Each structure stands twice: as C-alpha cells, then as structure tokens.
Image (spheres, rainbow, N blue to C red):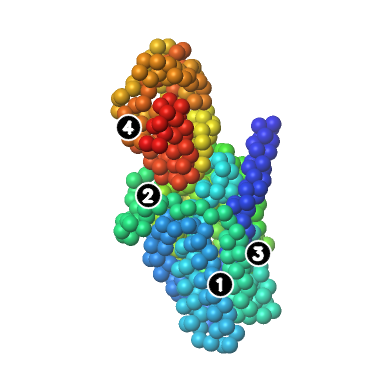
Amino acid sequence: MSGIADQLRESLRAVADVFRNPGLRRLQLAWVGSVTGEWAYVVALAVYAYEAGGATAVGLVALLRFLPSAAVAPFAAVLADRYSRQRVMLTADAIRAVALGGAAAVALSDGPAPAIYALAALVAVVSTAFQPAQAALIPTLARNPQELTAANVASSTVESVGSFAGPALGGLLLAVTSPGVVFAATAGAFVWSALNVARIPSTPPPREDAAEEALHREVLAGFQAIFRVPSLRLVVGLYSAQTLVAGALNVLVVVAALELLDLGRAGPGLLNSAVGIGGLIGAGVALGLVGLRGLGTAFAFGLVLWGVPLILFGAWPETAAALLFLGLLGIGNTLVDVSGLTLLQRTAPEEVLGRVFGVLESLVVGTLGLGAIIAPLLISLFGVRWALVATGLLLPALALVSWARLRKIDERTVVPERELELLLGLPLFAPLPPATLEHLARSLVRLPAAAGTEITRQGEVGDRFYLVDKGDMDVSIDGEIVSSLGPGDHFGEIALLRDVPRTATVTARTDASLLALERDEFVSAVSGHPVSREAADAVVAARLGRLRPGLASI
C-alpha cells in the first residue's frame, strides 16, 4: 500500500508541476476553450441536422465535416513542423471564431442550412491544424518524462471537462434558446483559447530548414515515420478503430436519446455529458500512469472499456443505466487518450512529431466520418439497440488480438533511469524534449573500461560521444595530461560537432564504466534542437578554449 501511496503522491506532484509550468498552464487553458467550444457546437449542429432530416442528415453532416478534414489533415499538420506551433494554434483559433460567428448569424436570421453546414466543415478542417500543433507542443514545454505524461493526463482531464461542460452548455442553451445562440457561445470559447495561446512563451520551429523541403516530402514524412516503426503502426491503427466507434456513437447517442430513451432536445447533451463525467473519473485513474511502464497494457484496457459499455447500453436501454455505462466509457476514453498519446510522443521523432499527429488526425476525422455513416446503416438494419451492441463488440475484440503486441511495446519503452539522469545533468541534452531524451537514454551503450584503457586517441576520426558513469579519466594532448574527468563528465563531442579529428587522448586512470552514443544519434539530437545546439556550441567553445587556447572560435 505504501508503494501505491508513493506513486500517487509522485503523480500528483507531476500534475501540479504542469500547472506551475507557465507554458503548459496556458496551453491547458487554451485547450479548455477549444474542447468546450467544439463539443457545444457539435451537439447544437447534430440536433439542428436531426430536426432537418433525421438520423441520415446527422450522418451526412458528420461526413461533410470529417471527410474533407481527413484529406486536409496531413497537409495542415506540416505547419506544426514548419512554423511556430503557437502561431499555428493562434491562427486556427481566429479562423474558427470567425466561422462560428458567421454560423450564428446565419442561424439567428433563419438563413440557409447549407451555409451553416459549410461553415461547420470549415471549422473542422481548420481544427486539423490546431490539434497536431497542440499535441506536438506539449513535449517541447514539458521538462521531464514524468511531466510529459502528467501533461497528457491534464489534457485528457481538460478534454473530459470540455466534453462534459460543452454538451451540457449546448444542451441547456438549446433547451431555452436556439442553435444560433450555441454557435455564438462557441465563437467566444475559441476567442478565449486564442487569448491563452498568445501568452505561451514562443518556441522556434523544430526544423529551421523546413521551408526548403518539398511539400509532398514533408507530408509523406509523417506516414513514413509511422510505417517504419511497428509500435507506431499498431497504436495509430487501434486509435483509429476507437475513433471509428466514436463516430458511430456520435449518431447513436442522438438517436438513442430522442427515440430509445425519449429524452427530448436536451437528451444528446445529457448522454454526452455522462461520457465527460466518466472522463473526469478516468483522470484520477490515469494519474497512476505517470511514471508507469505499462502504457501499452493501459491502452488495451481503455479499448475494452470503450466497447463493453456500449454492449451493456444496448442490452439495458434505461436512462439511469445508460448514464452509468457511458460514464464507464468516459473512463476508457481517458485511458486511451493518455496512454496512446504518450506512447506516440515517446516513440515518434520530435522533428516529424507534428506530421505524425497530422496523420493520426487525418485518420481520426476520417474514421469519425465513416463511423457516422455506418451508424445509420446499422440502425436501419438492426435497430438502435442491436446497433449499439454491434458497435461495442469491435474494440474489445481488437484489444484481445493486440494484447501481446501492446505488452511488448511496454517492454521496449522502459527508460534506463541512470542513463536518463546523466543526460539530464548535461547542458547540451537538458533542453531536449522528454521523448528525445528517452530515446537517447535507450540508445546509450554501456562500455566497461579497465584502468589504462585508451578510449579515444588524438588525431583519430570520432565516431562516438561518451559519458562517464563510474571511474576517472585522464585527458592528454601531445602526450601531456591536461585535465581529468570523473562521474557525470563527458567527452568526444568536439570531433562530432565540428567534424574534426579527435583533439585529445582520453585514458581510463581507474577501472571505469562508460556510456557511449553513436555519432548519428548524437548529432541528430543535438543539432536538431536550437536551444540544445546553442548549449553544445558553448560547451565546445569553452572546452577548446581550455585545451587549446585560440581554437574556440574555429
């Protein structure tokens, strides 16, 4: 029990650190406005469409929103790797606020419904740039891996709050006003999001040379990163299956509320709010994922919790029971979001992270639209109850088939704590995103060195960077000892960063244990991050100045 209590205290400290981090705090506040606004207007739009043309209209409107977004998402996500991610989010918020303001004006003046549907489609398309930028920005603002997971817990909690507050607000406003008022309120929510994004400390684009790269190559980089890594393929595939079910649920909830449970216009908002409340409870469960190694297993369990409640809902269609079942689904949704997003952030290279999330966003919106089209077909074939059961069966079956592979992901994503601690203690690595640090920590190779062993030789070509874990080293130039190194020190970076022969010979004075990082891994990590590159240049200049005065400026 004491171990569980310690883990919980550590998790709560990590979440508290998220809100003490100014950038992450403002990002979460912006996320509040974005999620709450989207849920409120989606509920209003669904009811508006249902009253105009029934379940088929709801599905067709979802298709209009999602399919263009799926096509645009990989291209929109390029913006998150080419430009400042804060600027991308700010622009998206501004466009969404204007579009929803226009939808409100059309609805309040009894204008044509197609105009509202077109503006809703624009909002959905623009949102495909916001979400990848937000997800890719989190690792750059987090200061360590625990804070990264905690930030995802906080984001999922915000999403749960928004998915509760948004539908509740939308449902209440619909009960006493009209969809036009809900659209206007949504525009205000996006303005709130923009105001908070504008206050996030600016970070440089992850790749300064991006503008010179062909657009089609940039777009393909996200797909290539996923196809190259089996664990990424698996997580993205299962995530897409979950959103396929979510797309069907968007329609099933409306039809079940109005036809099966007879809850009236406020019913869809009520049922969606139950999912949000469950998500809040799930956030408490997800706290246990901070620092946890079993993210793949948690992801599978979340998929099961997504499906089983839908089966129970179809078997027992009572209002109180439905609220309980959808609350359980909300817990599963939080587990899927936190574990799935953290796995992606830890596994995908930082320089293409925005585009990886762009591919995910494309698949998410595409499968949401596909699910929204499948649901009316299931309803017409089997009725609402059996459509719920059929939809709920998919994810538990996939989780069962994928369980062993997800557990292998857990085994591969274990981070060596000592290696990570040593990397964090060095100025040239400390600024790197947590996912990059974890990758480097796993890439370090431990090398024993007996006293008298020559590790590097002056004049040789450099192929590795070294960290001293245990023991003492002598550094000599032209046969003369000029300095010594001990635990926590490093060497070998000058030859790699300046592309010159080794400037000194390093010999183990005592039995020692070293950690080595291959040239390509080291150069890619340090040179690909502006702050880390500046720190590395400063370290190299200072060391050259000490070893060979006059070479620091080379």
Identify the residue position indicated by label 3 in the image.
Answer: 165
- Position of residue 452 relative to residue 25, above or below, is above
User: Horizontal placement of 484 versus 265: left or right?
Assistant: left
Q: Residue furthest front?
A: 550
Identify the residue position indicated by label 2 in the image.
Answer: 226
Give the mark toward the camera: 2 or 1: 1
**Are discs 1 and 3 less than 8 Å apart at CB?**
no
Q: CA distance from mark 3 to mark 2?
A: 34 Å
Q: Amino acid at mark 4?
A: Val
Residue in front for this viewpoint, 546 or 460: 546
Q: Residue at x 33, y 60 (%)?
A: 215
Give the mark toward the camera: 4 or 3: 4
Residue in front for this viewpoint, 410 or 505: 505
Identify the residue position indicated by label 4 in the image.
Answer: 500
Q: Residue at x 36, y 26 (%)?
A: 503
Q: Residues within 10 Å of mark 3 (few under 14, many from 20)?
A: many
Q: CA distance from mark 4 to mark 3?
A: 59 Å
Q: Amino acid at mark 1?
A: Ala
Compare marks 4 and 3 and give the one earlier in the sequence.
3
Identify the residue position indicated by label 1 in the image.
Answer: 97
Q: Amino acid at mark 3?
A: Ala
Compare marks 3 and 2 and give the one earlier in the sequence.
3
Secondary element under disc 1, as helix, strand or loop, is helix
